Image (spheres, helix red, strand yellow):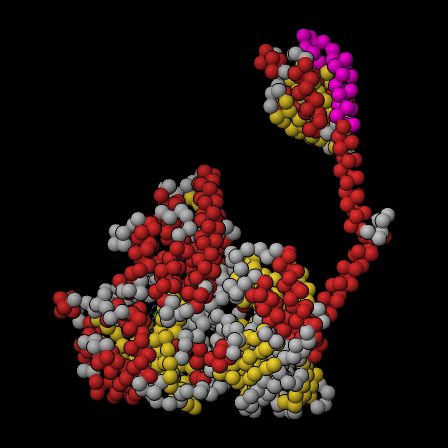
């Protein structure tokens, strides 16, 4: 069965059990402070498990793009070395939000595997949570056991401990016991030797977990206690690539049609056969795996960068490059060439790969080229380190510097040292690494207390599109502490006019006012698990009082101007540059806006002017805001709305229209484009290969900008003769400047010529040497020039020139080649000795050398001493 069909059958099966099929959420998370990437299917549904919002359907099924490279679930080091862990993989899942529970989850899973996919049940093992004796003091999962016993013989049921059979998303939040389904795909002989049940959860590559059924029934609180969830949920996750391995009768995920096209292409690029050796096999698997993770992230809008999620992506790509470099001898960018294959193969299920193919290729190619340069430089540095090492050991500090400052991978360092017979102080390196990790952990560590709940949150809790103030109550609050920001409070209101950071727009600031006049400042607003959180430095005295929530209105209106302007800018760019322009990121705040978009070359100044004109024309047209809330996603797209990749949209969306510009957007906007006043671009630059950035200002900021420019112009004019035409006046000055420079050059040449004939007269014969020693008034280059010219005209010449410039002394010594050879005179040696008179030093060659010093007073003495070398 083709992988495409395997995926389809899963979704169809659960559809037949009344589940609705939903799309995968983006793999890169934009507004979850606890998680960088989706690491399991349940992540996009967290808000439902936590009870923060109510799902439209209480049964859903999907395939979710997951990435396990950081945090609690990190498989990176396994990937490529084993055959069944990936960085990016698809997790097939079915969910019940407070609907069916263990009975259906278990029997449907069994039905699908054994009746639809026709897996031999004798190869399947299931596990049940055995309970725990720790402080949670949980009992055996009797319900699950009873249900399994009805379908699976006792000898294939395994009792699992907390590590394997109690699933937790993180340190806090929904959790519960689980039943895993494992498969044994070994040969009959191997099975006869060791029973499968002895190999479950023992990291055997042919006895692996394929599906995990989690029974969400608890919430882990901040203090570590468990509480029963009011409603019970089902969360299941099956590894798609592992399932394909089973159904396609393969022994490795990499032998399925998910990976073989990629491996074939790697073979044809590198000329290395998959299967040739362990090292090259691992390298090829690493590359085939990592290109998926990187391509999907870029499609989701996350480019490789130096911080946060972008840095994680960069490191994954570099890991792939490094495996190629070391084991497949690839010294040129090549991973980007795999993107075409990947997008052909996965594009049907994930269209974002197709539409962004050339962007993904460009970004990967640039990253590869730049990291290959780093590797080359690192090799040179490492060679120098080896040369300088007396005891054939490289210290941990040096290796860490290479790793940290230059990005040179430590395992490559270790490998090269080993090959050259050097040792690496690995303990020292680990210590340095740990120090760095501790520093960054300390800086970012946040500890959160439990929520104190006072009131419930209104269903439509955000009222900020229409109002900037509201009568509110505190729904809940908690204390959070971090090294960076100190003690803070997170406050959730029953409803709020405060816009939470999102869609590139900053969160609102303002105050929460109590009736007795106490004002609590809101320093930021963010969204977490579909709750709007206000960040404050303190709590009101009486948290149960009535409050008025007031948004800082001037900041909000400037921000709204900038947000609407980004929509018009987006439209302008598509109109001026073409429809290939896609938004790749934006930053909207009160002071300015930033807009990143895909485009292959620098935007010329004529194009920028056109864009500016386009936007300002829309502003002058006074286009009214037309807002549609709660329209269906598909209908909005049919009306021509632009949606962004990597953004998570629900079934019902908000569409914002100004004239012909229509976008799906949750941000705040002006009521009329004329409120923006004016739009001015202040910068255009490259963010990455194929991605440009425009920075711009509007409204007050634009007016301030023009005032400042006018003042600068006035100042320039006041210094010019022809103030009416400053451009002409400046160009006249420039012309004048050029002609003056030319005249000075001619004069200096004349001066040098005169000096030369003067000096020729002064040369005296001393002990068979034509000798000259005196001060001259020329710069270092002029002196050298003069000395060599004289040398060409006079044989057996010895010159010592002294000069004083900017309070410093310079001695220059010239000696004809004939003298350096026959009389053993050495200019380098001479200036070094004479250097002491001017408190300095120098050197050079036997025929020409210079010495600089800080004591010009000593020049005369040095010049007098020159004769002694001839005598
Ligand atoms: P394992 O013990 O094999 O690492 P897990 O216990 O971490 O698996 P879960 O967190 O329960 O796995 O995830 C659910 C399913 O997702 C697993 O049963 C497996 O099929 C799949 N899966 C988990 N991690 C990976 C991975 N890194 N690559 C591919 N599939 C995975
Ligand atoms: Mg795991």
In the picture as drawn, the residue positioned furthest to the top comes out as: 768
Q: Is residue 845 above or below residue 359?
A: above
Residue at the image position 65 percent from the left and 68 percent from the top: 615
Q: Nearer the viewer, residue 570 or 462?
A: 570
- Residue 25 percent across, percent down from the top left: 44, 75
Find residue 517 and report its image quarter: bottom right
- Residue 858 percent across, percent down from the top left: 76, 26
For the question of whether residue 383 can be seen, the reply is yes
Q: Is residue 81 left or right of residue 759?
A: left
Q: Quadrant of the N terminus?
A: bottom left
Q: Is residue 481 above or below residue 292?
A: below
Q: Nearer the viewer, residue 509 or 367?
A: 367
Find residue 759 and report its image quarter: top right
Residue at the image position 26 percent from the left and 68 percent from the top: 245
Magenta-drawn stretch contains 84: no
Magenta-drawn stretch contains 757: yes
Residue at the image position 20 percent from the left and 72 percent from the top: 196
Q: Is residue 297 left or right of residue 839?
A: left
Q: How many marks?
A: 0
Find residue 738 and report its image quarter: top right
- Residue 448 percent across, percent down from the top left: 53, 77
Q: Mainly helix, strand or loop, the magenta region?
A: helix
Q: Is residue 424 left or right of residue 658?
A: left
Q: Quadrant of the C terminus?
A: top right
Q: Nearer the viewer, residue 669 or 225?
A: 669
For the question of whether residue 158 can be seen, the reply is no
Q: Nearer the viewer, residue 761 or 650?
A: 650
- Residue 499 percent across, percent down from the top left: 61, 79
Span highlighted in magenta in the image: 747-771
Q: Is residue 383 above or below residue 651?
A: above
Residue at the image position 78 percent from the left and 24 percent from the top: 751
Q: Is residue 457 left or right of residue 226?
A: right
């Amino acid at each position: 069965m083709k992988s495409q069909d395997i995926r389809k059958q899963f979704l169809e099966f659960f559809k037949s059990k009344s589940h609705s099929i939903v799309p995968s959420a983006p793999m890169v998370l934009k507004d979850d402070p606890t998680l960088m990437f989706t690491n399991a299917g349940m992540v996009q549904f967290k808000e439902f498990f936590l009870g923060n919002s109510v799902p439209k359907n209480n049964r859903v099924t999907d395939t979710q793009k997951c990435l396990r490279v950081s945090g609690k679930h990190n498989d990176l080091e396994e990937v490529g070395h084993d055959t069944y862990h990936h960085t990016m993989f698809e997790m097939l899942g079915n969910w019940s939000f407070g609907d069916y529970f263990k009975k259906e989850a278990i029997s449907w899973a069994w039905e699908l595997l054994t009746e639809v996919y026709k897996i031999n049940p004798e190869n399947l093992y299931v596990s049940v949570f055995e309970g725990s004796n720790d402080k949670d003091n949980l009992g055996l999962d009797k319900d699950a056991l009873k249900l399994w016993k009805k379908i699976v013989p006792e000898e294939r049921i395994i009792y699992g401990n907390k590590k394997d059979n109690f699933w937790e998303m993180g340190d806090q939040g929904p959790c519960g016991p689980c039943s895993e389904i494992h498969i044994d795909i070994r040969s009959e002989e191997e099975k006869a030797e060791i029973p499968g049940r002895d190999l479950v959860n023992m990291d055997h590559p042919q006895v692996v977990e394929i599906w995990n059924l989690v029974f969400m029934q608890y919430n882990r609180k901040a203090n570590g206690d468990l509480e029963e969830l009011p409603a019970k949920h089902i969360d299941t996750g099956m590894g798609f690539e592992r399932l394909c391995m089973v159904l396609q009768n393969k022994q490795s995920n990499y032998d399925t049609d998910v990976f073989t096209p990629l491996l074939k292409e790697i073979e044809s690029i590198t000329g290395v056969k998959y299967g040739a050796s362990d090292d090259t096999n691992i390298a090829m698997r690493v590359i085939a795996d990592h290109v998926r993770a990187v391509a999907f992230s870029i499609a989701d809008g996350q480019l490789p960068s130096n911080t946060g999620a972008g840095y994680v992506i960069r490191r994954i790509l570099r890991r792939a490059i490094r495996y190629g470099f070391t084991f497949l001898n690839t010294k040129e960018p090549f991973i980007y060439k795999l993107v075409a294959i990947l997008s052909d193969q996965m594009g049907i299920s994930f269209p974002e790969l197709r539409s962004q193919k050339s962007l993904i290729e460009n970004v990967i190619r640039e990253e590869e080229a730049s990291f290959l340069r780093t590797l080359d430089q690192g090799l040179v540095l490492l060679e120098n380190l080896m040369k300088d090492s007396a005891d054939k050991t490289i210290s941990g500090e040096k290796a860490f510097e290479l790793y940290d400052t230059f990005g040179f991978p430590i395992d490559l360092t270790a490998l090269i040292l080993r090959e050259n017979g050097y040792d690496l102080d690995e303990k020292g390196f680990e210590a340095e690494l740990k120090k760095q990790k501790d520093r960054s952990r300390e800086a970012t560590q946040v500890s959160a207390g439990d929520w104190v709940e006072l009131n419930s949150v209104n269903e439509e809790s955000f009222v900020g599109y229409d109002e900037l103030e509201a009568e509110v109550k505190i729904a809940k609050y908690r204390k959070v502490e971090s090294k960076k920001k100190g003690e803070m409070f997170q406050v959730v209101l029953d409803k709020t006019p405060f816009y939470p950071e999102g869609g590139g727009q900053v969160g609102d600031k303002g105050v929460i006012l109590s009736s007795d006049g106490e004002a609590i400042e809101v320093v930021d607003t963010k969204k977490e698990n579909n709750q709007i959180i206000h960040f404050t430095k303190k709590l009101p005295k009486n948290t149960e009082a009535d409050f008025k929530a007031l948004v800082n209105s001037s900041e909000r209106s400037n921000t709204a101007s900038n947000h609407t302007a980004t929509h018009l800018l987006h439209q302008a760019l598509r109109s001026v540059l073409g429809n290939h322009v896609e938004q790749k990121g934006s930053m909207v705040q009160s002071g300015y806006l930033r807009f990143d978009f895909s485009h292959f070359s620098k935007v010329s100044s004529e194009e920028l002017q056109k864009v500016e004109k386009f936007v300002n024309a829309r502003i002058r047209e006074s286009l009214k805001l037309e807002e549609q809330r709660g329209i269906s996603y598909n209908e909005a797209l049919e009306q021509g709305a632009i949606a962004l990749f990597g953004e998570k949209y629900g079934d019902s969306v908000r569409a914002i229209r100004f004239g012909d510009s229509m976008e799906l957007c949750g941000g705040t906007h002006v009521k009329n484009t004329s409120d923006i006043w004016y739009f001015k671009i202040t910068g255009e630059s490259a963010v990455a290969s194929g991605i440009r950035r425009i920075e711009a200002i509007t409204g007050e900021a634009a007016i301030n900008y023009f005032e400042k420019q006018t003042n600068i112009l006035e100042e320039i004019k006041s210094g010019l003769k022809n103030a009416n035409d400053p451009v002409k006046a400046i160009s006249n000055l420039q012309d004048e400047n050029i002609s003056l420079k030319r005249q000075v050059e001619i004069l200096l040449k004349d001066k040098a010529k005169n000096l030369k004939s003067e000096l020729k007269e002064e040369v005296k014969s001393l002990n068979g040497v034509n000798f000259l020693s005196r001060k001259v008034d020329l710069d270092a280059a002029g002196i050298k020039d003069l000395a060599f010219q004289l040398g060409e005209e006079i044989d057996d010449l010895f010159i010592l020139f002294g000069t004083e410039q900017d309070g410093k002394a310079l001695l220059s010594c010239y000696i004809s080649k004939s003298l350096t050879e026959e009389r053993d005179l050495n200019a380098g040696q001479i200036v070094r000795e004479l250097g002491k008179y001017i408190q300095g030093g120098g050197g050079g060659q036997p025929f020409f050398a210079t010495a600089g010093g800080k004591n010009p007073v000593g020049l005369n003495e040095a010049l007098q001493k020159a004769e002694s070398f001839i005598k």
